[in-house]
Amino acid sequence: MQDLWIVGGSGAALEVWAVARAMEAAGPQPWKVRGFLVINGSLEFNPEGLEVQDESTFLAAPPASSALIVLGLGEPSLREKVAQVYASKGFRFATLIHPSAIIGPACSVGEGSVLMAQAVLETHVKVGEHALLNVGSSIAHNGSLGACCSLGPGVRLAGWVTLGNRCDLGVGSCVRPRVTLGPDTRVGAGAAIVADHPGSATLVGVPAVPRPAS
């Protein structure tokens, strides 16, 4: 039985823990949640008796290599940086899929990704490493998500949608078929994406357009 540590101390970590707990309730897992790794001991919720360790202390004297890591961090770029730190220390990452999630045929989910309750991958969908698919998000056929993407609750991606690395789509947003969004695209809540964008911008509105720089 491997120890599973969740990195983070805010809402995303709490939601990741809920997925792990649901998986444990559904049947035996090769791991057991040990606790949370947080910055400066800051935790925004009650861990129900689980351990809480400062991340820097944990990394200075890591436990046995059998320990697994999962990232409870909502910000895609931060998730990428933290994943690189733990990978450099030799840690492996757990992939968590809520029992109510639906994974269709010919789909793949990258190491370290988390699929929350009622997330749906229809068919021939590829999800990169350390992606975070929130409650009720769905990806239609032939979709592709790069590493460290985040889909908010209720996000809808139509068929043949491609997202580059570190894209972050807000709650209730949607993307029409065959649209490609480049790396580091942010999409506002409720936005409707109807055209390709090269990335590194925030798209808002219906139909969505780049938000002017402030």
Image (spheres, rainbow, N blue to C red):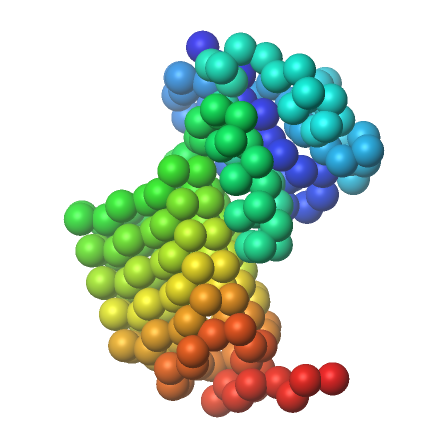
Q: Is residue 174 above or below residue 136?
A: below
- Residue at (47, 74) in percent of width and height: 199
Nearest to the observer: residue 169 or residue 15:
169
Q: Quadrant of residue 138?
A: bottom left
In the picture as drawn, the residue positioned furthest to the front comes out as 88
The residue that appears at 26% across and 70% down in the rendered structure is: 159
Is 156 on the left or on the right of 214, as rendered? Answer: left
The picture places residue 166, in percent across and down from the top left corner, at 49, 59
Q: Identify the residue at image location x=28%, y=63%.
A: 143
From what the image shows, is residue 207 above or below residue 161? below
Q: Position of residue 203 (x, y in %)?
A: 55, 80
Could you tell me if residue 157 is visible in this image?
yes
Residue at image x 45%, y 10%?
1
Q: Which residue reaches farthest left?
A: 106
Locate the C terminus by quadrant: bottom right
State the residue in front, 60 or 187: 60
Does residue 115 appear in the picture of this structure?
no
Side of 169 where 141 appears, left or right: left
